[in-house]
């Protein structure tokens, strides 16, 4: 999930939604939590497909670039986008405080799939002239959840997964993020 720093007053509701999704996953994977920065809602391996649903050409470009950001990161990711898959990516204007939302379904195994939803409304409200960069940063961040990275890792190093990052400057996985994906799937 990506929450807006401007929406701290509504964070309780957002966190609740996030916790509900996470606890559903944890119930099925209670033995697999190994590290503070590990997100059990991710995919069981680094090769998966994402189907774009109801996205325009602008968002298809963001999905393509976000996918390429991971495939070219040297972490063993092999992600195909815009192909038939139960895992989906969509973008649209939602009256919500989050920029992006990731939900993992079913147990962490062959049946696991996810939905990524990106909030074009909130992004355009907060990004100003940096909308394209922010949109790519959020899209790449959400795919980071599919690669089992959690929000706000406990590190002082730069991370794509921090809500406090400068979205105008950080669109790609950082050294810390790459090391974590490699560690998790080793
Ligand atoms: Zn997130």
Image (tube, rainbow, N blue to C red):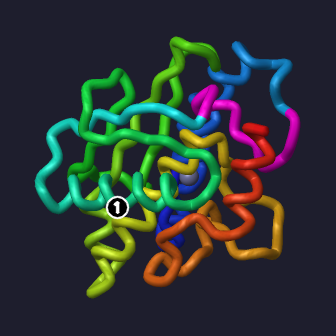
Query: Residue 133, located in which quarter of the rendered image?
Result: bottom left
Magenta span: helix, strand or loop, mainly?
loop
Query: Is the C-beta of the residue carrying label 1 under 8 Å from the nearest atom of ligand 1?
Result: no
The answer to whether residue 116 is above or below residue 66 is above
- Residue placed most toward the observer, 32 or 74: 74
Residue 98 position, x and y percent, is 43, 55
Q: Which residue is mark 1?
A: 65
Instruction: Determine the secondary structure under disc 1.
Output: helix
Image quarter in which the C terminus is found = top right
- Residue placed most toward the observer, 120 or 146: 146
- Classify residue 72 as left or right of residue 54: right
- Magenta range is 34-45
Residue at 70% from the left image edge and 69% from the top image edge: 175
- Classify residue 12 as left or right of residue 136: right
Residue 61 position, x and y percent, is 23, 60
Residue situated furthest bottom in the rendering: 129
Query: Residue 9, located in which quarter of the rendered image?
Result: bottom right
């Amino acid at each position: 999930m990506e929450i807006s720093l401007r929406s701290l007053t509504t964070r309780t509701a957002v966190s609740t939604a996030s916790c509900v999704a996470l606890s559903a996953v944890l119930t099925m994977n209670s033995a697999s939590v190994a590290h503070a920065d590990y997100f059990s809602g991710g995919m069981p391996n680094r090769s998966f497909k994402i189907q774009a649903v109801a996205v325009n050409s602008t968002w298809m470009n963001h999905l393509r670039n976000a996918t390429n950001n991971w495939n070219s990161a040297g972490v063993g990711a092999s992600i195909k986008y815009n192909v038939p898959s139960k895992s989906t990516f969509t973008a649209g204007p939602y009256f919500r405080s989050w920029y992006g939302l990731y939900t993992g379904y079913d147990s962490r195994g062959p049946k696991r799939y996810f939905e990524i939803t990106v909030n074009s409304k909130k992004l355009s409200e907060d990004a100003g002239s940096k909308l394209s960069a922010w949109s790519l940063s959020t899209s790449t961040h959400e795919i980071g959840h599919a690669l089992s990275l959690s929000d706000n890792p406990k590190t002082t190093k730069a991370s794509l997964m921090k809500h406090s990052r400068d979205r105008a400057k950080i669109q790609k996985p950082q050294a810390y993020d790459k090391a974590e994906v490699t560690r998790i799937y080793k």
